[in-house]
Image (cartoon, helix red, strand yellow):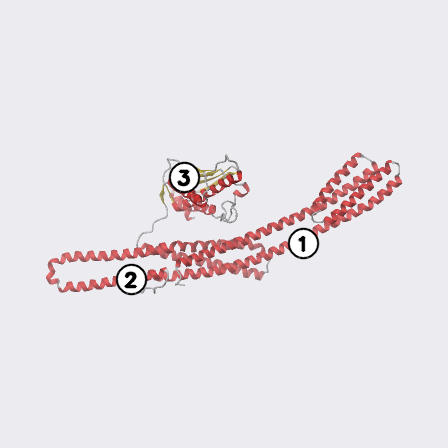
Amino acid sequence: MPSVSIRSRLIFLAALLLAILAVASALLIGQLMRASDDLAEQAKLVSIVKNANSASKHFGDLKYWITDSAKTLFVRSQQNADAAKAQLDRDLKAIAPVDPAGVAAIGGEVDTLSELARKAAEAYSSDDSVGGNALMQQAQTHILDVDREIEQIVDRSEQHALARRDASMGQARTAVDFSVAGEIIALVVALSLTALIVRSINVPLRRLEHSMTAITRGELDAPIPLPSRDEIGAMASTLGMLRDSLIERDRLERERRQAEAEIRAARDAAEAAYRDLKAAQANLIQAEKMASLGQLTAGIAHEIKNPLNFVNNFAGLSVELLDELKETAAPALSALAEDKRAEIDETIDMLTSNLDKIAEHGRRADNIVKSMLEHSRGVTGERREVDLNGLIEEALNLAYHGARAQDQSFNITLERELDPELRRIELAPQEMTRVFLNLFGNGFYAATKRARENGEASFRPVLTVATRECGEAVEVRVRDNGIGITPEIRDKLFQPFFTTKPTGEGTGLGLSISYDIVTQQHGGSIEVESRPGEFTEFTIRLPRDGDSARAGGAA
């Protein structure tokens, strides 16, 4: 592995972890979609059962009123019979898609029953009670047939619903088992590679640090790691060249001291000048040492620190993903045998422990880089006082020109209401720029989407950015006149991986990361107000109290 550069190793690791996250998300989304389809199908079957029971009730009303109407000839009874038949027809229409044969049979029987009742009514009205009774006796046979057919439809519908429920549960258990097994295997492979890569960086880096520390103390005979083809090997080679140069300087200095000792008697008058020259030389040598080491350590920091952060961040993110996996798989795991469930729990706990070790060694490597930097220069904090209006202006221009570079037809009106009395505030400018870019990009997307869907020539996409001095805090508002956000999804906006954009256009992480930056890193707050089809406005409040902001970041 030393033949592969550290940058390539860390990029490969980051890509692998991203792929695992994508696969895990896809598996979870697929499982949720299948579960949703099964629930919809089960709800449909339950509705059919309800309609079948309702048909039984309405037919009971129909047979009562149609019999009463035939015998009494009351208009009210005939109206009630017609109403009961209309309700029965609606129930049969709902049942027809799943049992067309049964519905057709019932419809024929009901029509025959209605015709017999009509003829019986005519016989009774003509004082032919014998004929009317005979017709009603025939009608009773059809009534029994309809009751039996409706009862069979109810039984078939209930059995179909129960069979569908059992099949859905079996499919869900199988899908969860495959999902858990696949994700565990992928995590084991990724964690193994992560541990290997981190160790391949941490071990030689620690050796190089010891060598640099020893040379800084003047121990020029300290061992140096063997050169290799990666960045650490190149630094080891440079450090060896530096040590050889210092040894040569010391040798020349010793020879020079010996020659001076031989002619000291002849140069007594220049002795004072020589001491000054010697002190100047010593200072120059030390300055050259520190300058060389400063360049070397700065190179290490800029080449390794950012990729190393990927290792630390993805290790933490993998722990969260593992926790989400445990929660998602909990219903399926509870249905497994106790020994199988214990085996899976032990594997997940082992993976969590391995992730903690990876994060620990990643932090150790990061501390090594920081300690090497401290040999050449002090470590400065990430926070500083900035002009917030200027920072917003830069982020707004960057977001606008970035959108224009991706889509030449993109156009939006930018309105600025920046408070001219706004005082400078202490914050992490790079992190807050990231927040503003996320909010501006979302506003651009919502406003231009409404412009495309609206179709009105008079509609003009607008994004408004406003700042306001609030004494102990600073307020920033970002408002767009886009499609808006519905109330049912507003509470989910800051959840990781939640997005309203089509697949491939959003990761669902922008607002989640922005929320963490504002609330946890700066001790502030971020709120959203929206009206669908009209506007969306995000409000950020940042405290001026530096201690409170730092306490929020530490939390």
Which residue type carries mark 3? Answer: Ala
Q: Is residue 167 left or right of residue 324?
A: right
Looking at the rendered structure, the secondary structure element under dot 3 is strand
Give amino acid for label 1.
Ala
Tell which of 182 and 119 is nearer to you: 119
**Quadrant of the rendered image containing residue 89:** top right
Q: CA distance from mark 3 to mark 2?
A: 54 Å
Is residue 340 in sight in this rendering?
yes
Q: CA distance from mark 3 to mark 1?
A: 61 Å
Residue 402: x %, y % from top left: 43, 45
Q: Nearer the viewer, residue 93 or 497?
A: 93
Residue at image mark 1: 163
Q: Residue at x 47, y 56 (%)?
A: 17
Q: Residues within 10 Å of mark 1 (few under 14, many from 20)?
A: few
Residue identifier under label 3: 473
The x and y percentages for residue 130 are 89, 41
Residue 362, given in percent of the width and then of the height, sits at 41, 57
Q: Which of the two discs, 3 and 2, labels the residue nearer the N terminus?
A: 2
**Circle 2 is placed at which residue position?**
241
Instruction: From the viewer's perspective, tell me whether residue 420 is left or right of residue 94.
Output: left
